[in-house]
Image (cartoon, rainbow, N blue to C red):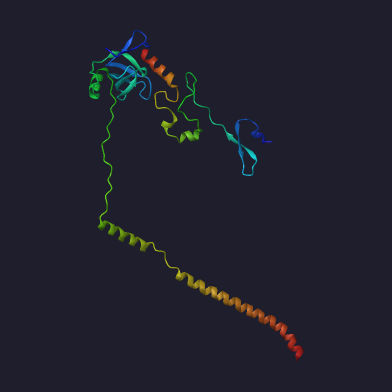
Amino acid sequence: MPAPRLRSRSLRKVFSKVPGGRTTIHYKKRKPKTARCGNCGALLKGIPREFPFRMRSMAKTKKRPERPYGGVLCSRCMRQEIVNKIRQ
Amino acid sequence: MNGDVICNEVIGGKMTIEIGRLAVKIAGRDAGNKCVIVDILDDKYVLIDGETRRRKCNVLHLEPLNQTIKIEKNASHEDVANSLKEFGIEVRVTKPKPKTDKPKKKRKTPEQLKARKEEKRKFRDIFKPKKKEDKIEPKEGTLEEKAWLVEEKKEAKAETTGKKNVKPKAAKKE
């Protein structure tokens, strides 16, 4: 029986085989959700799904696509946004 | 013009894609920047210049504007910059990198090699490990002394034990 604090599913289980041959359960923190478009909710590409401490050590160019609204809107919504602005 | 592409998406009239047409780039890292069509390469691609980099571009990645400029086909970057000044558009300026040759490796002359060898010899003398003769001598002496002492003690013990055994026998004999 696992410890009471580990019985919730806030931590994810990782089954690992120990040298003795039996499998043990390691409880690890879950990763944050994948980034989504602020307009349509589509999954954003080019944004790594990493822990904040790992994202902090990453370069700015590795964290989001290098274009206006990069990392906020998907490319399709971004184009529509720019076109709408021009046509106004 | 032959090779013109009609952009049907634009509301309020059809906007043709032609040389000198101002447009806004929609896709990529230059998105949102204004540019001029300098050349029509294909029924798909055009050459653009302006706030964006001077580059080939898909027609679908451009949103044409109402304004046009009089430019020659395949006009140079400077001409485009001069003509765009009227619209208050500043052209992207990139500083060309100064050309530098790779550093060539030169063979060292025999004199230089000799000087280098001498330097190495000097350093060898400096970093040579010191001899441990001075340190070992007292240790050897002490060890020997200890060894002697041990032997002396053993002898002394043997004497004492021997005397005890011998004394009564001698007394009996007497």
When the figure is inspected, residue B126 is found, relative to residue B159, above or below; the finding is above
Q: Which residue is drawn at 33% across and 59% down?
A: B120
Residue B71: image x %, image y %? Answer: 23, 17
When the figure is inspected, residue B27 is found, relative to residue B145, above or below; the finding is above
Residue B49: image x %, image y %? Answer: 29, 22
Which image quarter is the N terminus of chain B in?
top left
Q: Which residue is drawn at 69% across and 82% down?
A: B162
Location of residue B26 by image quarter: top left
Q: Residue at x 64, y 39 (%)?
A: A23
Specify whether B8 is left or right of B138.
left
The residue furthest bottom is B174
Specify whether B24 is left or right of A31.
left
Specify whether B143 is left or right of B120.
right
Number of numbered discs on residues: 0
When the figure is inspected, residue B133 is found, relative to residue A72, above or below; the finding is below
Q: Residue at x 37, y 12 (%)?
A: A87
Residue A81: image x %, image y %? Answer: 41, 17
The residue furthest top is B12
Location of residue B109 by image quarter: bottom left
Which image quarter is the C terminus of chain B in?
bottom right
Residue B149: image x %, image y %? Answer: 59, 77
